[in-house]
Image (cartoon, rainbow, N blue to C red):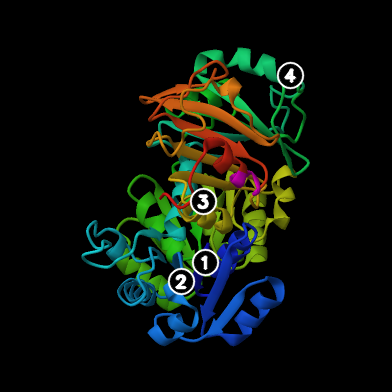
Amino acid sequence: MKIIILGSGKIGRTIAESLIDENNDITVIDINKEKLNQLQDKLDLRVISGFASHPKVLREARAEETDILIAVTGSDEVNMIACQVAHSFFKIPKKIARIRSIGYTEEINLFSKTCIPIDYFISPEKTIVDGIRKLIQYPGVSQIMSFSRRIVSIVTVDMKNDNLLIHLSVSKVQKRFAHLKCKLISIFREKVPIFPKDSTIIQEYDEIFFIIKTENIRLLMYELKILEKPYRKIMIVGGGRIGFELARILEKIYQVKIIEKDSEKASKLSEILNHATVLHGHVSDKELLFKENISEVDAFITLTENDESNIMYALLAKKMGVKRTIVLIHHGSYINLIKSGMIDNMIFPKQAILSSLLGYVRRMRSNISYIREGVLETIEIKLNRKNRYSGVIGKKVSEINLDEGIVIGAIIRNSEVIFSISEQKIKLYDILLIFITKKNHISEIYRTFKMDKDNF
């Protein structure tokens, strides 16, 4: 496919890096020539320097031949205008925009062909906030991803601190939790995802992925003896867009304090937030933390733009008695800090961005969770058209020939989750949860399912 990406910041780079690996023809537009040159030195793509929404610049990028335009500049307004120009001047079939302002995203009818022609919008900040909210809602797990209108979830549990599953076989784990309607689908071991056999033994430091009905998550946590008391006191470091939005949502339920070092920003947060306490100061100030009873804080969340600062703040808070630390991290190289027990949870913006975007760009009518830098992906595919999925509808799961590294984990049928699927015949309107370990498996899914990529 021919794709134009507007903006070469963190989000634009992340999207370009992922899509270039899937044999797409990519052009990136930005006014910053230095960023474009850095991107072109790293990736095999075309770059154009200019204003993202100008028709002349889009024409130079051959917009009239483009399949998808992805507008992810730092300005909501530029992104919206660019999509309007792409629609009116160049008839680009699909327009995707990054929209950060709640004032826009809450207007249901704003994005349509009769108003602003944006087919799909992404809000990485909203996705990140939702991920953090789930970790606070289910204290004790390391990651939660929801699918099929939250009927089913993927729950990740770290095998540390003498977890009771260590040294058990997968078959014994399945028997132990059979009543919970769940399935151990994957194990992350030494940075590599594996699809375990019944005889596979759980090891210390494994990361276990369960598929489970969302309503049973707390029961699973209870039986794993990792269910913690509900959180009450939350402290957030950083009053940027993510910090503000998180505080705005959490202050309705929890006792929230937010630390912001910029006095002007702190003052503005105090005016906007209704119940959260805004503290002007630096999080490295131990006196401030003692004064605010840091040892009583249940969840300490660091959301600055600097990975090293986020980690150092979290380590300091942990040392001072905080129960759980959640850290925003842009680079996956710090993942081992979780295994060491120094950090409890990490949130990766890259995962949030690509999880929001990939299903739509690939034209698969699917939701995707992008895990561990894309080493593992979970894809939810809705079989809503017989001619589009003729390769699998009517077949038993055991009759479908899939490459190693592709696994159908569960079937959602009429809001029920089916885990024992080997002899199940796949039906029209089923929803499949599929796990893949390599990006080239996407083409294999197209072939096996007999999906027409252009029939969107």
State which mark lies toward you, 2 or 4.
2
Q: Which residue is mark 4?
A: 168
Q: Amino acid at mark 1?
A: Lys
Q: CA distance from mark 4 to mark 1?
A: 49 Å
Q: CA distance from mark 2 to mark 1?
A: 7 Å
Towards the viewer: 351 or 102 = 351
Percent x, y of residue 372: 65, 48
Q: CA distance from mark 3 to mark 1?
A: 20 Å
In the rendered structure, which amino acid carries the disc numbered 2? Glu
Q: Are marks 3 and 1 in contact (CB under 8 Å)?
A: no
Give yes or no for residue 243 being in the magenta stretch.
Answer: no
Spatial separation of the CA atoms under disc 3 and disc 4: 32 Å
Name the residue located 39 percent from the left edge and 73 percent from the top edge.
79
Residue 433 image offset from top left, x and y in percent: 52, 33
Nearer to us: label 4 or label 1: 1
Amino acid type at circle 4 is Leu
Give the numbered dot on residue 65. Answer: 2
Q: Are marks 2 and 1 in contact (CB under 8 Å)?
A: yes
Disc 3 to disc 2, C-alpha distance: 26 Å
Which of marks 4 and 2 precedes in the sequence?
Answer: 2
Q: Position of residue 298 (x, y in %)?
A: 52, 44
Would you identify the image quadrant in which residue 39 lies?
Answer: bottom right
How many numbered marks have been drawn onto this rendered protein structure? Answer: 4
Instruction: Tell me where the magenta segment starts and ends, as one range.
Output: 439-443
User: Which is nearer the eye, 100 or 52?
Assistant: 52
- Report which residue position mark 3 lands on: 355
Q: Which residue is mark 1?
A: 2
